[in-house]
Amino acid sequence: MDIDEHQQWLVNFYKQRNWYDYSPFIHLNFLTEEVGELARVVRAIEIGRDHPGETHQTPAALDANLNEELADVMDQVLMVASQYNIDPQELLQASQNKLTARFHTEN
């Protein structure tokens, strides 16, 4: 599945549950929450966690959690992009154009 197909699947999934009706502002808040969860798992991987309410996780469990949280962040970005009618392929190209121009790379 490519990013466009996933975005369309995601939009349909959200519309079936009436979640797509939430404003981009609310989806931005969901994105912020997901970034916090991503930060928590990266911290656990990089420096560990010392929280009495958490159990020790194996490296495999941490990797699975990292993948899950990265996907959640990506999904919220795709939702906001969809609500503003922005093609995710355009986002990828804009990123490449900006970095290439800023750092004068050949690739």
Image (tube, rainbow, N blue to C red):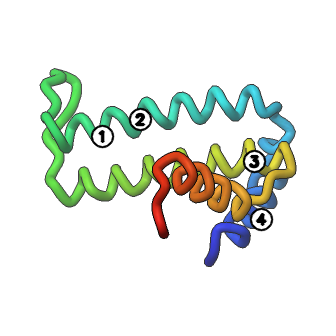
Q: Label 3's element?
A: helix
Residue named by callout 1 = 41
Give the mark nearer the N terminus: 1 vs 3: 1
How far apart, in angstroms, are the residues tagged by discs 3 and 2? 21 Å
Residue at 47% in and 35% down: 35
Q: Is residue 81 above or below residue 24?
A: below
Marks 2/1 in contact by CB < 8 Å: the verdict is yes
Marks 3/2 in contact by CB < 8 Å: the verdict is no
Name the amino acid type tagged 3: Ala
Q: Position of residue 105 (x, y in %)?
A: 46, 60
Give the mark nearer the N terminus: 4 vs 1: 4
Q: Is residue 103 above or below residue 49?
A: below
- Classify mark 1: residues with Cα within 10 Å, few (<14), some (14-19) or many (20+): many
Q: Is residue 28 left or right of residue 32?
A: right
Residue named by callout 4 = 8
Kindly indicate the quadrant of the structure image that contains residue 20. Answer: top right
Q: Position of residue 83 (x, y in %)?
A: 83, 44
- Front label number (3 vs 2): 3
Give the mark nearer the N terminus: 3 vs 2: 2
